[in-house]
Amino acid sequence: MRSPFAYVPRRGPLQLASPGAAVSYLGAIVVVAFLYSNPLVLVAAGAAASLAGYLAGARSAVRAGLRLGLSLALLMIVVNALVTSRGETVLARLGDWPLLGRVDVTLEAIVAGLSYGLVAAASIVAFAVYSACVDPDRVLRALRPLAGRSALTATLVSRLVPVAAADATRLRDAAALRGPGAAAVGKAPLARRLLAGSLDRAVDVAATLELRGYSLDAPRARNRRARSRYDRRFYAVAAVVLTTAIAGKLLGADDFQAYPSIEIGLGPGTITMAAVVLLSGLAPLKRPARRPAPRLEVARV
Amino acid sequence: MSELAIRRGAAPALAVEGLSYAYPHAAARALEDVSLEVAPGEFVLLAGRSASGKSTLLKAACGLVPHFHGGEIEGEVRVADLDALATGPGELAAAVGYLAQDPETQVVSTTVAAEIELPLEMRGDAPTDRARAVEEVALALAIPHLLDRATDTLSGGELQRVALAAALVTRPRLILLDEPTSQLDPVAGDELIWLLRRLNEEWGVAVLLAEHRLERCLAAADRVVAMEEGGVGFDGVPADFLAWADEHDHALTTPAARLFSLAGIDPLPIGVRDAKQTLRGTGIAHSPHQASRRVRDPRPQAPVLQAKGVWVELDQGEETRDVLRGIDLQLRPGERVALMGRNGAGKSTLLRTAAGLHEPVAGKIAVDSIALLTQNPGDYLVRERVGDELPGEQGLAALRTVGLEHAIDADPRDLSGGERQRLALAITLAGRMEGEQPPGVVALDEPTRGMDRARKDELVSLIKRLASDVDLVATEATKSTRAAAVVVATHDVEFASEFAERVVLLGDGVVIADGPMAEILSGGWYFATEVARVLDLPGIVTPEQGAAALRGEAG
């Protein structure tokens, strides 16, 4: 079974864009998530990443990213509520807990946890879209002239991950098929066997890379692919988002405070920022093909 | 030397002189004083038993030996006039392509187009040249529809073609293939061999192909080199090779040649067409009326496996697929059944469902008790002593059943390939036997991949013992009275004709034929033995049966 985060080749703008343009665009959304703590802007960042994924056709990656991100967000809210007793609005006094001491659950700690969780969720969804839409081979090959050894290692690892996953499934099946009279297989021998098998597999994959000429000098500049017609769009959107984000931060658009009492700014700056980020999610939209205008029939006399 | 010079030059595609090689820390040499030459545009078949040095010779020809594997090497290897011992595999890739057995580790990119383009990109070709080369090789291998696919969504046969395309995209003078058909069904295997022949004829690519199933590719070859214990045992044209194999090593002969040899007809045929022509020329005609037909034992016992309307749906990433679609099947004790069909027909899924690894979405499957050995016996071996894998009396009984009780203190890694497979089978049997009696069903999934004839014969004996109701082990104290139903999923029609008495043919998840082996394997073209294709007599599938029929008619 394929991972929902696995790259799927499609003919959408995000997939056709060069790795630099796609990474800049998705990276800008992640930067906003880390730069801001206002929940409205963070929700906009998460929504933009999800929208981008949906428009790019990576629906299962977005769903999986949202599941993972929101679960993590929930965990962060719970942990923050338990370990932080700051805040004026006490919702529950849970008494003394081992290790944690006195636990007071406050509304402020929950909202602060939500803010951290939204940062994580938006970043995870953006990464899920990156993973499903940006060809890792193109990224690695773009990196190769800059860091050959790292690119080789990353290529080897990126190929070994699915191979090792398939091996692990086979080993689990074989363990399940052992007769009841055979020695039981615990996790440790299975892991050892998988590791030993992975080393053999790594040798085979490395041999293939060698045969494909990976040990030759890094390709020259003319080797680079032609830029996609969508590159400019993604670079432009990334620039607008980053500029707006930095300007907004400097001008006080990130108006949020959790302690001692909650203050969520919803001024024009924050709303503008959220709107810009949300609209950036439309960048992978593919325009319908233009049809030629119908020609007027000229009656010949 | 420039690529242009390589192409125009009259130098041999491969020249090996006095080559000896030992892998690091190996006790014996894998190659011993090997000398041979492959001319430009020649199609050479590399024959030989397992561990005879075929794979090592191919690796030396593409530079992996010694540059990648290390070890000690003597002699000379020149590929298109490049010194392979001084030049690395990356540089040699312009002149030689290599395709190994396992396609899964031969694909390193995420998309098919990127995979095929990679060797050109690595050597610095311009994007326009790369695009054209990818398009041309994709057209030649009939895979343009795969170019935009992700490589991890391809089937084994598709992966094999993509790996071949990546090996051919640089337009090498020589292509090396190590058992490329071992994981393919007969249809895909035949397609691949004739595709190679076409590339050989149209592109002028020299081919050096290592194979065990010689009947599949002998007719396509210009020459055969037979390896024996690391050296060259024979080097000549296919007809002479068959005569040599008939005298020297029966394990290397083809079923059609064996048929002629047993029937006393000369010359031995290199393929089906050749055999038919000879039979017509000698005036030995055969009539379907005189052919014997095997009668199926009705076997009145209760079934040990009963499947009724079984549907199995498997998740394949973005979508699910019905892999089994309403299968009805019964197996009775003592039956030896070959489960056949194209790649993806549902053979493995049926066995895995019977063993409880998949749950049917509709229908029922009832099994008495089943031991399933999957395709990779190595997956079952996780400890460093045979006795630790199979402790106690139950373990010992299982070892006795497969004839490995003598190896109880051995390290599984020190066992031969055939012994490792028997050990894995014993692991699945242990505890499922009643005393020395096997479980109701013993299932093997593609057990002959990469096996030579001698190992296949050993496996046939074991299958027959498991399915027989005489004593399984050679001790007076333990007599077995129950026979297992043995079901083997296989692409190997010749192997099926040796062990099976019934063949179940699957197609796209449904049973499309189910009947006596001799009837099924003589009634088609792809799923038919070579002897059946030569004689075209109902019920005649093995060389022995065919020779008897020919002798009877000739006399």
Image (cartoon, coloured by chain):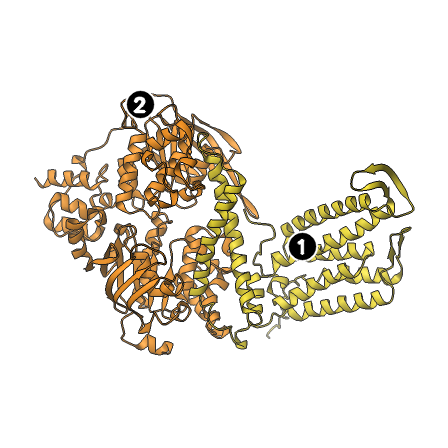
Chain colours: A yellow, B orange
In this rendering, does residue B197 appear at all? no
| Residues at discs 2 and 1 both on one chain | no
Local SS, label 1 = helix
Label 2 or label 1, whichever lies nearer to me, is 2
Q: As rendered, which of A21 and B186 lies closer to the eye?
A: A21
Front in this rendered view, residue B50 or B117: B50
Q: Secondary structure at mark 2?
A: loop
Mark 2 surroundings within 10 Å by alpha-carbon count, few (fewer than 14), some (14 through 19), many (20 or more)? some
- The 10 Å Cα crowd at callout 1, few under 14, some 14 to 19, many 20 or more, is many
Residue at (58% x, 54% y) in the render:
A6
Q: Nearer the viewer, residue B326 or A169?
A: A169
The residue beneath circle 1 is: A54
- The CA distance from mark 2 to mark 1 is 66 Å
Residue B390 is at least partly visible in this image? yes
Question: Residue A24, image x and y in percent?
Answer: 68, 66
Location of residue A141 in the rendering, given as x and y in whole percent from the top left corner:
55, 67
From the image, tell me which residue sits under label 2. B478
Q: Do the residues bearing badges 2 and 1 touch, measured as CB atoms within 8 Å?
A: no
Q: Is residue A149 above or below residue B338?
A: below
Q: Chain of mark 1?
A: A
In which quarter of the view is residue B455 placed? top left
User: The C terminus of chain A lies in which quarter of the figure?
Assistant: bottom right
Type of amino acid under label 2: Thr
Residue type at mark 1 is Tyr
Q: Residue at x 48, y 43 (%)?
A: A170
Q: Quadrant of residue B23?
A: bottom left
Is residue B412 toward the left or the right of residue A6 in the image?
Answer: left
